[in-house]
Image (cartoon, rainbow, N blue to C red):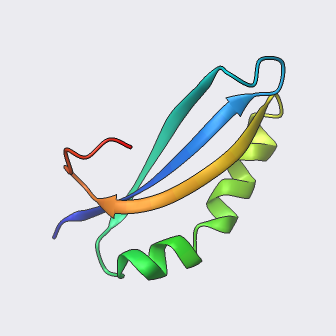
Amino acid sequence: MGLIELIVTVCALSASSQCEDQHFSFPADMSLHQCVMNAQPYIAQWINEHPKWVVVRWRCDYGGSKEKT
């Protein structure tokens, strides 16, 4: 079974130009649309654990994808 990745772009509160992608992998037992729609609890947990960062966007992709946007 493959993986789906939730890719969350976060930026530092102290320097809004300092952004990076965080990757979370899940078994691919859902569609990309379902992944996006179900991402909020994982994002909320990450925000609670990293209060100096803010989430600016998120997307889902199949694990191993070479696309970087």
Residue at the extreme left: 1
Tell me where residue 14 appears, x and y as whole percent. 83, 18
Q: Is residue 2 above or below residue 31?
A: above
Left or right: where does residue 35 sit relative to residue 47? left
Q: Which residue appears at 19% of the width and 44% of the height?
A: 66
Q: Which residue appears at 80% of the width and 45% of the height?
A: 48
Residue closest to the eye, 51 or 32: 32
Q: Which residue appears at 58% of the width and 75% of the height?
A: 38
Q: Is residue 65 above or below residue 2?
A: above
Residue closest to the eye, 23 or 61: 61
Q: Is residue 67 above or below residue 40?
A: above
Tell me where residue 46 appears, x and y as whole percent. 68, 46
Left or right: where does residue 18 sit relative to residue 60? right
Left or right: where does residue 60 sit relative to residue 51? left
Q: Which residue appears at 63% of the width and 59% of the height?
A: 42
Tell me where residue 9 appears, x and y as whole percent. 57, 42
| Quarter of the image where the C terminus is located | top left
| Quarter of the image where the N terminus is located | bottom left
